[in-house]
Image: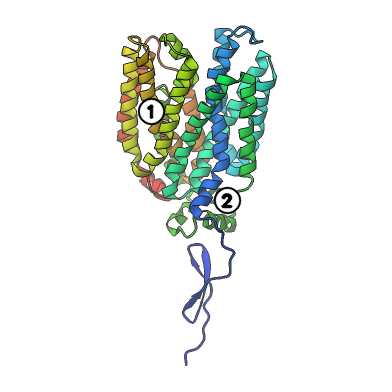
């Protein structure tokens, strides 16, 4: 008769299993009724609510400036002051990105979200409650600062909690929520005054604050600060038995991580330069002004909403396209299509009132499926864990600075179109492919 031998616990995908007489006994555990993929999507609700408010921040100038320039607005704003109201948010976004990396590495991805919801709400309240120009500057600074800090950390949080197959659509949802925020602020601005729009926008950071309190921080950050047991428990909760992704928690020594920083950093700076200098935020910030300059014979706000709807539709399409197409393929289609549409706008826009809307609509469609979502998506994928926070923060900062350093002149949109075409060619040379790959596989490939 064989002896009854009980073996010690063995590890299987992060779950301890006892073996008795050759039979495996699973320990009694309380299983969650939610699937890992559903948990990954639900945990992204809080960050994405903040991203919607970020989109509202980007599109708010289109609502605020025309209303301030109308008679009886209560505030006299010159053209230069209006430009500074728009630019103040962009400059503070760049500053916020610099803070984002050290902050998310020190206190965590979750706490960084929660901390920045407070100035975000305060900024919107200042914009809503003060008919005094300096307070508009302060409100724009605070909302822009919050966007700058939260944009990289939202991307990192989603990238680190999502599995390889869900990561692309989830990160594409970041771009969708920016587009949704832009459409929402323009829609509200069509019917409400700028101060009431601000009140509505203040609710979204509050939603972000509440939702992020429900879910844990990312397993990668917990691992990086030495909380190993908690990191593996949270990893199993988010990913289930996805043992193929477990090496994402692997730590690297300082020398190798430093060598793995510069290559993705330079690639992402190139990508953000192509994105910004192809005019994506310039069109978002000044849509109504652009349509007025080309002599559009229809209500500018209606035309803006049409363009916003196109942006939102194709941002939704990007969530699907990023699941089925390679990143490099999508960036090529987006860059070539955007560049062609911009050149058409520059060369043919004044011939008939409808050509500007058609060419801008085509531009927004092409840019929304690739050049807009891909840089924000990939900064959460290409940096090694040890430098992910600082890498995302600095490359995002470069993106906002690239927007502030506008290109153009008399041939602004022609320049934007050429940048899109030439930049796409450079991206095809150096952009790595990250679709359906774990963060560890991406890191090792870039290191080689």
Residue 340, given in percent of the width and then of the height, sits at 30, 22
**Nearest the camera: 17 or 255?**
17
User: On the picture, is 132 further left or further right than 157?
Assistant: right
| Identity of the residue drawn at 42% across and 11% down | 296
Q: 10 Å neighbourhood of mark 1: few (<14), some, or many (≥20)?
A: many
Looking at the image, how many numbered discs can be counted on the residues? Answer: 2
Query: Is 181 situated above or below 191?
Result: below
| Residue mark closest to the camera, 1 vs 2 | 1
Colouring scheme applied when the structure was drawn: rainbow
Q: Quadrant of residue 140?
A: top right
Q: Which mark is residue 365?
A: 1
| Identity of the residue drawn at 50% across and 27% down | 183
Query: Is 408 situated above or below 446?
Result: above
- Ranked by sequence position, the earlier of labels 1 and 2 is 2
User: On the picture, is 128 further left or further right than 49?
Assistant: right
Mark 1 lies on a secondary structure that is helix
Query: Is 206 situated above or below 403?
Result: below
| Identity of the residue drawn at 62% across and 28% down | 200
Residue 265, given in percent of the width and then of the height, sits at 43, 35
Name the residue tied to disc 2. Answer: 222
Residue 282, visible in the rendered structure: no
**Nearest the camera: 188 or 212?**
188
Q: Residue furthest bottom?
A: 1
Spatial distance from mark 1 to mark 2, Cα to Cα? 39 Å
| Identity of the residue drawn at 59% across and 9% down | 70
Q: Which mark is residue 31?
A: none
Q: Are marks 1 and 2 in contact (CB under 8 Å)?
A: no
Mark 2 lies on a secondary structure that is helix
Residue 385, given in percent of the width and then of the height, sits at 49, 46
Q: Quadrant of residue 227?
A: bottom right
Residue 349, visible in the rendered structure: yes
């Amino acid at each position: 008769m064989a002896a009854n031998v009980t073996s010690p616990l063995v590890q299987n995908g992060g779950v301890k299993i006892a073996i008795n007489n050759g039979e495996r006994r699973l320990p009694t555990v309380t299983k969650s009724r939610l699937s890992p993929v559903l948990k990954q999507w639900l945990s992204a609700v809080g960050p994405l609510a903040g991203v919607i408010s970020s989109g509202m921040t980007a599109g708010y100038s289109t609502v605020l400036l025309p209303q301030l320039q109308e008679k009886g607005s209560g505030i006299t704003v010159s053209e230069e002051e209006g430009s500074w109201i728009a630019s103040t948010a962009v400059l503070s976004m760049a500053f916020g990105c610099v803070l984002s990396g050290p902050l998310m590495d020190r206190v965590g991805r979750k706490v960084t979200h929660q901390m920045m919801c407070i100035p975000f709400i305060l900024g919107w309240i200042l914009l809503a409650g003060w008919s005094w120009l300096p307070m508009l500057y302060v409100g724009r600074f605070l909302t822009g600062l919050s966007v700058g800090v939260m944009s990289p950390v939202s991307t990192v949080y989603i990238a680190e909690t999502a599995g390889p197959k869900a990561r692309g659509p989830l990160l594409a949802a970041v771009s969708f929520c920016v587009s949704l925020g832009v459409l929402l602020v323009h829609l509200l601005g069509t019917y409400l005054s700028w101060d009431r729009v601000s009140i509505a926008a203040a609710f979204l950071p509050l939603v972000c604050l509440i939702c992020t309190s429900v879910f844990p921080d990312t397993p990668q950050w917990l691992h990086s600060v030495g909380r190993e047991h908690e990191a593996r428990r949270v990893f199993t909760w988010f990913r289930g038995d996805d043992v193929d992704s477990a090496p994402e928690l692997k730590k690297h020594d300082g020398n190798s991580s430093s060598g793995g920083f510069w290559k993705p950093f330079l690639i992402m700076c190139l990508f953000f330069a192509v994105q910004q200098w192809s005019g994506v935020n310039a069109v978002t910030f000044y849509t109504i002004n652009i349509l007025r300059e080309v002599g559009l014979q229809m209500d500018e706000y209606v035309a803006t909403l049409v363009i916003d709807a196109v942006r939102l539709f194709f941002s939704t399409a990007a969530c699907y396209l990023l699941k089925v197409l390679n990143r490099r393929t999508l960036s090529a289609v987006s860059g070539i299509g955007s560049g062609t549409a911009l050149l058409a706008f520059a060369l043919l826009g004044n011939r008939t009132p409808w050509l500007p809307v058609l060419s801008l609509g085509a531009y927004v469609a092409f840019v929304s499926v690739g050049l807009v979502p891909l840089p924000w998506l990939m900064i959460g994928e290409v940096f090694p864990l040890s430098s992910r926070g600082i890498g995302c923060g600095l490359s995002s900062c470069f993106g906002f600075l690239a927007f502030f350093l506008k290109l153009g002149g008399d041939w602004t949109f022609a320049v934007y179109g050429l940048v899109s075409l030439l930049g796409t060619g450079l991206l095809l040379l150096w952009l790595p492919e990250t679709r359906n790959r774990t963060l560890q596989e991406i890191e090792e490939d870039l290191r080689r």
